[in-house]
Amino acid sequence: MSKSKNVSKAKGVRAEFTEYDRRVGQAFSLHIAGKAEAAIAEFEKLVDECQDHIDANYGLALAYKAAKQHDKAREQFQKVRQYIEAERAKQASDDTARFQMLLRMIDQHLATLS
């Protein structure tokens, strides 16, 4: 983990819920509510705290896309893809299905941004 400030990395689907995870959920709530700029601000803070956190980076990519910042969205989706591949290489198979699903979703988003 590059720039982590006491952010625990989840190990598998059933990992304990952390304060950081709660904040990621709040940022996703802003995104879902259509508040793209507020979501971007929150996701950027989260990514600053934990540069390679998959869910925070994915949320940032979605928020950029919603804000029609397509170049930033495309770049962010590519980063998420790299973080997923790096995490897959470290793990056995407990999150394989989740990672495969996320990669398919990323590919779909990137196709709409092309």
Image (cartoon, rainbow, N blue to C red):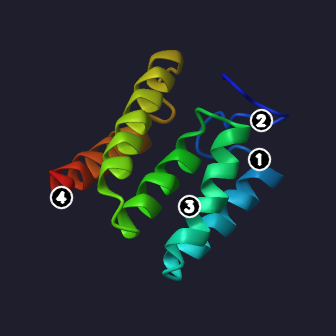
Residue drawn at x 32%, y 41% as measured from the top left: 103
Question: How far is disc 3 from disc 4 in space, using C-alphas?
Answer: 20 Å
Residue 91, x across and y down, in percent: 53, 21
Q: Nearer the viewer, residue 53 or 13?
A: 53
Marks 1,2: beta carbons within 8 A: yes
For the N terminus, give its image quadrant. top right
Residue annotated with mark 2 = 8
Q: Is residue 34 left or right of residue 13?
A: left
Say whether disc 1 or disc 2 marks the residue closer to the N-terminus. 2
Question: How far is disc 1 from disc 4 in space, using C-alphas?
Answer: 34 Å
Say whether disc 3 or disc 1 marks the residue closer to the N-terminus. 1
Q: Amino acid at mark 3?
A: Ile
Q: How many marks?
A: 4
Residue 80, x across and y down, in percent: 43, 38
Question: How far is disc 3 from disc 2 in space, using C-alphas?
Answer: 22 Å
Nearer the observer, disc 1 or disc 4? 4
Residue annotated with mark 1 = 16
Q: Residues within 10 Å of mark 1 (few under 14, many from 20)?
A: few
Question: How far is disc 1 from disc 2 in space, using C-alphas?
Answer: 9 Å
Q: Is residue 68 left or right of residue 64?
A: left
Residue annotated with mark 4 = 112
Residue 40's label in the rendered image is: 3
